[in-house]
Amino acid sequence: MLASDIEGQTVGLCPADGAAHFPIMTPLYFEKPADAAGFMDFNVLRSSFYRTLTTCLPHALGTNFRSSDGPLTPYLVTVNSAAPKLPLVTRHMDDECTIAAMRQSGFMPHVQPKAILCETAKVARNPLGGDPLVTLDIVYMSDGVGVLLVISHAIVDMGAYCRFIIEWGLVAKAVACGDSGLPRELDTDRGEFWSLVSDCAESVPATEFERHLAELDAAGAEVPPAHLQQATIIRLGADPAAVAKLSLTRDRLCPGISVPNFISALLWRITGRASQSEHAYFSASLTIRGDPRFSKYWGNTSTSNFIHVPRERLLGDSLVDVARRVQDSVREFSVANFARLIELFTAKDSWYNRSLCKYVGAAGVARFSVVNISRSVPFYDIDFGWGRPVKVMYQAVKIPGLCFFMPWSQDGGIEAIVCLSEPAINALFKDELILNHFDVVRVPSD
């Protein structure tokens, strides 16, 4: 599909993605080699960024937006690739922060550049409300460079976000060598994407979770009380050696369960212990990216797969039963399931969307939502021509129960960045399995 194929069209943002307006932010830190001429040159990075953006953005819109003659959609935007809302690319000089100091502290927030931690995060919100589509800050330190690209989740998911940066790196290498650096032809087909959704949706019956939501909606169930305190970001780090130790524990307690699903089960039970709700919910995202039919798309295609159990059952079941339930929900989520969710969200009277926000999104619910990018998203393969990043982080948003699994380093390991209420944090710091296998750090608020 060419950019001109959607030129001038008014298209509607799929409501399944329209609810997620928070920004995606992953700071990348690059260490300066001793002999790297022109290391991370600002003009090269800025020029290649704009060239990549003006080519890739229409492809993201082409798969993330549904044509306005389809089902009723509340968000409309006119695509104009000839005059895009190009954001400012801001250069910062930081004489206080160093890569060496960040390494020593484990990349804790208090030693990271302020431009990366605070300024940009407060700018990029919902682009459909007139805010910038993306923002970019590049911070130069004495021994390295920090890069923070922010894109609204309403436009892309984490898989497309990473793919954009990888493409940007390829263009930057070409620009640094004096080439035009224009991205190669992209093969996104918007029509194929939506045809796939329509063809698959009818083949899936209603899930238990869907029936559960319908029952709550029909009965006019009460929303759980909002008893949660201020949410806080917690980082659980496990280097490769710690993951090896965790794998042995997993083999003993929950054989056949993947390490991320084992961790998810532990954390879901912790949110359950901290909740007063009757219901407990788990969801997994990014699973659809593994299907080759979706791997080429640049939009937001990571609608979450939810499951529900009574909270008493979550706490009463064995850890292995909870872990199996988590793993089954991840493995069974198919292209057809995804298609049905899209159809539910885009219905004219989307009771599903309304009920999901009202009951599952309410404060006080034992909700745990995981986005596992520890293996599926190759952040440590990003290279602008001067080597791979020494550290890639996820700058979390404060949505209680939301968790991201990131690689700990180039060498492996896993880092879980999770937002928890104070009651859940208290339960976490009493959990021996967590404390025996992770370096647990409370991230200070900015």
Image: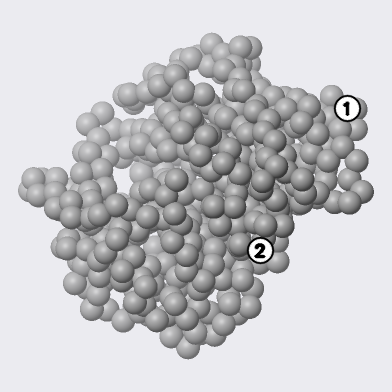
What is the spatial separation of the Cα atoms under label 2 and label 1, in whole angstroms?
Answer: 39 Å
Q: Quadrant of the C terminus?
A: top left
For label 1, the residue is 179
- 106 or 20, nearer to the observer: 106
The residue type indicated by label 1 comes to Asp
- 386 or 165, nearer to the observer: 386
Classify residue 261 as left or right of residue 230. Answer: right
Relative height, residue 221 to residue 131 (above, below): below
Check disc 1: other Cα within 10 Å, few if <14, some if 14-19, many if 20+: few
Q: Quadrant of the N terminus?
A: top right
Relative height, residue 138 to residue 372 (above, below): above
Q: Position of residue 372 (x, y in %)?
A: 51, 58
- Residue at horizontal 25 percent and vertical 75 percent from the top: 315
- Residue at horizontal 17 percent and vertical 63 percent from the top: 276
Classify residue 343 as left or right of residue 86. Answer: left
The residue type indicated by label 2 comes to Gln
> Element under label 2?
helix
- Residue at horizontal 47 percent and vertical 69 percent from the top: 440
Q: Position of residue 400 (x, y in %)?
A: 33, 53
Q: Earlier in the sequence, mark 2 or mark 1?
A: 2
User: How is this picture coloured?
Assistant: one colour
For label 2, the residue is 104
- 393 or 356, nearer to the observer: 393
Tell me, yes or no, if residue 131 can be seen here: yes
